[in-house]
Amino acid sequence: MDWRSSWLSREKRALLHTLAALALALVVILAGEALSGLVGNAINATIYFPFYKVKTTLSHLALVAADVALLRATVVETSSRLQFYNEAMEENRRLRALMGFAPPVGFKIVPAEIFGVYGSGMPNTVLINLGERRAVRVNQPVINRDGVAGRVAQVMKEYSVVYLLTEPRCRVAARIKRSREQGIVRFSMSKGMYLDNLPRQGDVVIGDTIITSGLGGIFPEGLVIGTVRSVEWPEREFFYDILIQPAVNFNALDEMYVLVPEY
Amino acid sequence: MRYLPYLLYLMIIACDRTLLSGWLSIGPVQFNLAPLLVLLVALRKPYLAALWFGFVAGIVYDAPDPAHLGMQSVMLCLLGIITSRAKDRVNLESTTSRILLVVIGLIIHAVPQTLVYVTSGPSEPVLLLLTVGFPGALYTALIGWIYFLVESGQLSYRRLRSMF
């Protein structure tokens, strides 16, 4: 009898709870907006709050990520544009410098564009966009804003090959600007650029400027070749051993000018 | 401490409603975590626990949309009641019988859930059930099945590794 009354009371209790729960749910449904709003707000403010916070943060992060991507693209575009402007500014500076650069008497300056630079290790040959049609001929001097760069070695209709001073076949009759001592500027891979044929009696010191002498028949007089880097006097040798620091940076050639005779 | 797991389940329902539902949905087919949790509670806990958990879970489920507040409570209460009554007649040791109970429970729940809550899709109720409601129930049941497999040790990281 005991187990039956216990079962009945358990069933009764379950039924009461069921009715209570369903009645409560019905009250909430029928109570209208005032109660449902209140209950909804209370639950939103407690249980849902951290998740709303996370959701808001995630959506903010997504927006920030989109902004970052946009800004990165803008930075890339702006930096490439800035690079272009810097290049233009540099070109402008070079052209301004060139305007104050007077060519030697009897020559005119023809700007040339470099198409190719050749040479193993040190550049020694360049291809430029001037040829026969622009009155370029073999052995015409080629300079840049710093000094002598080389001479024209081979001419085609639209292009020319230029031997730079770093090409062993390109030799220049030169002199020391201060003392007027003469010699020949040569280049070898082992020594670099050097002034040859200057006898021991010659007056030369480190830092002297070397210029073209005009005696070789190719380069006009007075173009800068470089400065004396070291002077040595080997025993039992008749000539000085003079190393030169070239005025032109052959690794950074950008613009070149061919000196074309005016007549 | 006694009510802490239930509170955790409610938090999981809130998390699903706010964060996970969007990620877990496959088109219009949605994963319904709340009825699955009520079913799991009903399978493991006494009748009264399932009943009241269904009621509170329904309230929490409806909180972001108070216009429907109470509807889900009625549905989940009834789901808890039916499952609690039915579990005495099945062998709960068997994964198949448990998942069968879950599938039936979810399909029963899907009918009023779809008709009351789903606003997009076909206007024909039968079509709506066939395209949205029942696929959602089966999708949820699939997740429940995976849960049972993991729980019983039939699916584990080691087993998965040995398979591949």
Image (spheres, coloured by chain):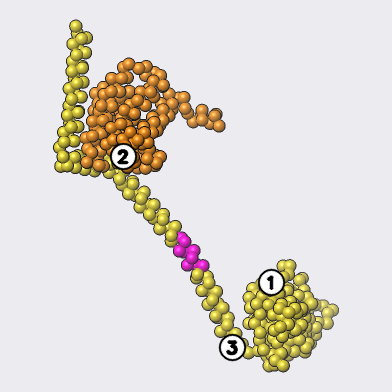
Chain colours: A yellow, B orange
According to the picture, the residue beneath numbered tag 3 turns out to be A100
User: Residue A168's quadrant in the figure?
Assistant: bottom right
Q: Are marks 1 and 2 on the same chain?
A: no
- Residue at the image point whose x is 28% and y is 41% from the top: A48
User: Residue A126's quadrant in the figure?
Assistant: bottom right
- Residue at the image point whose x is 28% and y is 38% from the top: B117
Three-letter amino acid code of the residue under disc 3: Gly
Q: Is residue A245 magenta-colored?
A: no
Q: Are marks 3 and 1 on the same chain?
A: yes
According to the picture, the residue beneath numbered tag 2 turns out to be B123
- Residue segment shown in magenta: A72-80
According to the picture, the residue beneath numbered tag 1 turns out to be A116
Q: Are marks 3 and 2 on the same chain?
A: no
Q: 10 Å neighbourhood of mark 3: few (<14), some, or many (≥20)?
A: few
Question: The numbered mark 1 sits on a residue in which chain?
Answer: A
As drawn, is B65 to the left or to the right of B26? left
